Image (cartoon, rainbow, N blue to C red):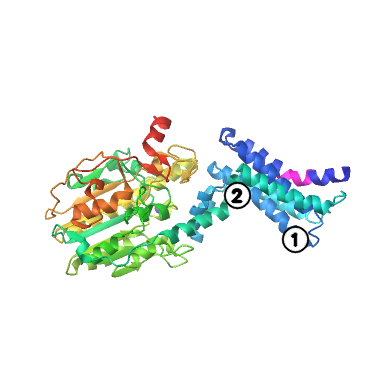
Amino acid sequence: MFKNINTIALLVFPLVLKYVFLLCFIDWALFDIQDVLEDVCFVILMGLLIYSDLRTKQFFKDTLLMLYLLYLVIETTSYMAVSSNFSSSFMYLLLESNPDEIKEFSSAYVSLPIVLFILILVIFFFKIRKIHFKNHFKHRNVISVVGVVLTIFILKFSGLIESNAYHNMVRGTYGYIDLQNSIKFSNNLKKEDINITLKNEVLVVVLGESTARRHMQIYGYKRETTPKLNAIKNALYVYDNVISTDVFTLKSVPKIITSIDIETNNEFNIHIVELFNAAGYDTYWLSNQRPISYHDNAISKIASSSKWFKFYNHLKDKHALVLDEVLLPDYQKILKKAGKKVIFIRLIGTHFDYNKRYPKAYNRFALHDEGVSKEDVMNDEYDNAVLYNDYIVSELIRLLEVQNQKSALLYVSDHGENIYDDTDFFGRSEEVLTKSMFEIPFILWTSKYFEYPDDFIYKPNRKFMADHTFESIGHVFGVAHKTMNSQRSIFSSSFENRTRKVIDKIDFDTYFNTQDE
Ligand SMILES: [Zn+2]
């Protein structure tokens, strides 16, 4: 028995190290006792396997040790980087990012303690892989098998497994694939089911990316980040109480541009491209985001049903550097084409890595000397990106305006972004929600020839959630399917308030009013 003590201590060492690091580098209040219990179970589980005679080959031993150490690396670095355990929603972020973005993310989050922790565990691995973990119990293999099964049962039925990084990776991936597959669209809209009430000619829908309202001057931000939009403010309908449903692109965008909303998940989903196709409009989709991440996703499917579409951002080596102005020449060409049309513009916007989202000329806020905090640098770069985004959106409006048609442009961001606004991290997470992750710009521009619906009304502070953008567009532009309802339109006098449930379960208004104010 005592022979085992040393090797047991050796095996528990990385776990202890995890808590030493967390104790030193993160706020202990963030910690959850569930995680601790789950860690203990997991270590017992790994210990039982490592000690059993069931694995005799070095290869299996190495694999087990690596699984064990990798687990600690994932959970510990996740806590140190984003103050949260590795959750299944985290997996979304990884799945919807491409390798370059992941590289960018990790280089931004990496810190000396994280490097040190990983380094220690790597050295540890090479030190202990040759050590004999031998136990001297009778029936040791029976004990191992029974122990492993028992521990898995405990993890599963106590719910502790929810805090396990590996479990969350699998669950996150499964949920992601499931979500993408569950979105089905009717692919044969009947023209007689569509009601065209106005004679509008050109609609432009601009889908922004990661642009937080509170960093925009036009919404009262202290810095001059949107001078161009401010200059035409009187020609804009600027809505200041619109939120996204989610904090991840692949969850929020489909709800913006389809009939899918948080209340219904019916079989009969319509997406916006199909609606305008059936209504006889030419549809165009210009995207400065890659067509696919790891799996084909719902947004790409919708985009590809446009009559003409183009993705500017899939050159592997430099795609993260393609600025949004890349789509302006094609946009201009399309505007000059005859016929009624709808143009969808998908920007890379202010997506991380912020300093890759604007040309040098737009570096107005990150002109600091040495010794500025990481938080300030991040904020400055983000604000530069917002400034450039202001140029793009106003340019899209300007080019549309000179056509002198019955036209409108709607600008909405897919979700917001947290740049150390309410918490000590940047980015987005479903575990630590902040208001700024949901607060999005929602701005309508119309030409002087635009035909409004009879019940149009401008109430800038309407409590609106972006999953009814689809309904609002149909209403204001005068192209609606029979299943659409103007009570859901932000532009209608018959608009009805509802509970704004974000990430499928949280009442945004109650949650943040009680917690923040
Ligand atoms: Zn996004």
Pick out the residue farthest to the front: 267
Q: Where is residue 89 in the image (x, y as percent from the top left)?
A: 50, 49
**Res 284 quadrant in image:** bottom left
Residue 457: horizontal and vertical position, in percent?
Answer: 17, 43
Identity of the amino acid at label 1? Answer: Phe
Q: Is residue 313 magenta?
A: no
Given residues 90 and 163, the one toward you in this image is 163
Q: Residue 324, can we see it?
A: yes
The quadrant in which residue 314 appears is bottom left
Q: Main secondary structure of the magenta part?
A: helix
Disc 2 from disc 1: Cα separation: 21 Å
Q: Quadrant of the C terminus?
A: top left
Above or below, 208 relative to 332: above
Mark 1, other Cα within 10 Å: few <14 / some 14–19 / many ≥20: some
User: Is residue 159 rendered to the left or right of residue 347?
Assistant: right
Give the numbered dot on residue 60: 1
Magenta span: 9-14
Q: Residue at x 74, y 44 (%)?
A: 13
- Mark 2 and mark 1 residues within 8 Å of each other at the beta carbon: no
Disc 2 secondary structure class: helix
Say the numbered circle drawn on residue 165: 2
Callout 1: helix, strand or loop? helix
The answer to whether the beta carbon of the residue marked 2 is less than 8 Å from any atom of ligand 1 is: no
Q: Can residue 281 be seen in this view?
A: no
Residue at x-position 57% and y-position 54%: 169
